Image (tube, grey):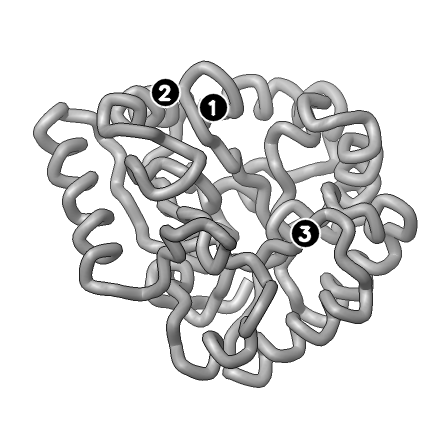
Amino acid sequence: MLDLHCHILPGLDDGAAELGVSLEMAALAADSGVTHVFATPHCNTRNPQKNFRSRELIEAYTALQRELDRADIPIRILSGAEVLARGHFAQHLAAGDFMTLNASRYLLVEFYFDESPAYIEDCLAAVEAEGLVPVVAHPERYFCVQHAPELAQRWADAGRVLQLNKGSLLGDLGEDAYITAALLLRRGAVSVIASDAHHFRFRTPHMGALLDCLARRFPEADPALLLRENPLRIAKDQTL
């Protein structure tokens, strides 16, 4: 499996605070069958650490890979970022400030939970205007989608990639997120499920419970497609 969305880089956001946490997270992921992890630190936030494209950020990916190799943890780190669509988003897009997923055309984008549908649509269109494909992080958590799931269905129909959070399907992120995630998954609107992991004790990258959940509650879903084939196609910059 490939985990498309994970806050595993140490000391860059509200995920892994230090290297030891990153190594524990990677070991958990590997134990559950994950082979590749997209390291996607929060980007374009109000925090001082903006995590725009930089030599220092690129070194953070390679430094973590070195430590994983040294610890003999069989995980490959792929580059990326979870870009918050706020502020001068379009200008940063045009300037190439955001790290795409494994240097592909795919950009992982998130929104404030209470964002308006019109603003989300404008931002997704801005991503496409730059020749990129938006990957919408956890659409099931946005209030507008919880109120009107057909919004996310339209995004999927237009070729935008919808990425559900593991925790939403497990019921860890609230009833509204679970109901919306389940609906989108059953409608076939979802292309990827990822951990959005932040630690090894809570919101972890271990995929065991998710696989059990899919088998029991969502037999119509294809775990291989959602957790391996589509993330691999993104990593290779291929069409889903």
Q: Which residue is mark 2?
A: 28
Q: Residue at x 40, y 81 (%)?
A: 95
Quick check: 28 left or right of 211? Answer: left
Tell which circle, 2 or 3, labels the residue nearer the N-terminal end. 2
Q: Residue at x 17, y 48 (%)?
A: 62
Residue 177 placement: quadrant: top right
| Callout 1–callout 2 Cβ contact below 8 Å | yes
- Given residues 195 and 54, the one toward you in this image is 54
- Rendering coords of residue 23 (x, y %): 25, 25
Q: Is residue 74 above or below residue 37?
A: above
Q: Of discs 2 and 3, which sits in the foreground?
A: 3
Tell which circle, 1 or 2, labels the residue nearer the N-terminal end. 2
Q: Residue at x 60, y 50 (%)?
A: 137
Mark 2: which amino acid?
A: Leu
- Rendering coords of residue 12 (x, y %): 34, 43
- Given residues 108 and 186, the one toward you in this image is 108
**Residue that lies at the very extreme toward the top in this rendered image:** 201
Q: Is residue 237 above or below residue 169?
A: below
Q: Which residue is mark 1?
A: 204
Badge 2 element: helix
Question: Quarter of the image containing the N terminus?
Answer: top left
Q: Residue at x 39, y 52 (%)?
A: 48
Distance (Cα) linking label 1 and label 3: 22 Å
Badge 1 element: loop
Question: Quarter of the image containing the C terminus?
Answer: bottom right
Q: Is residue 173 above or below residue 188?
A: above
Q: Of discs 1 and 3, which sits in the foreground?
A: 3
Distance (Cα) linking label 1 and label 2: 8 Å
Q: Which residue is mark 3?
A: 112
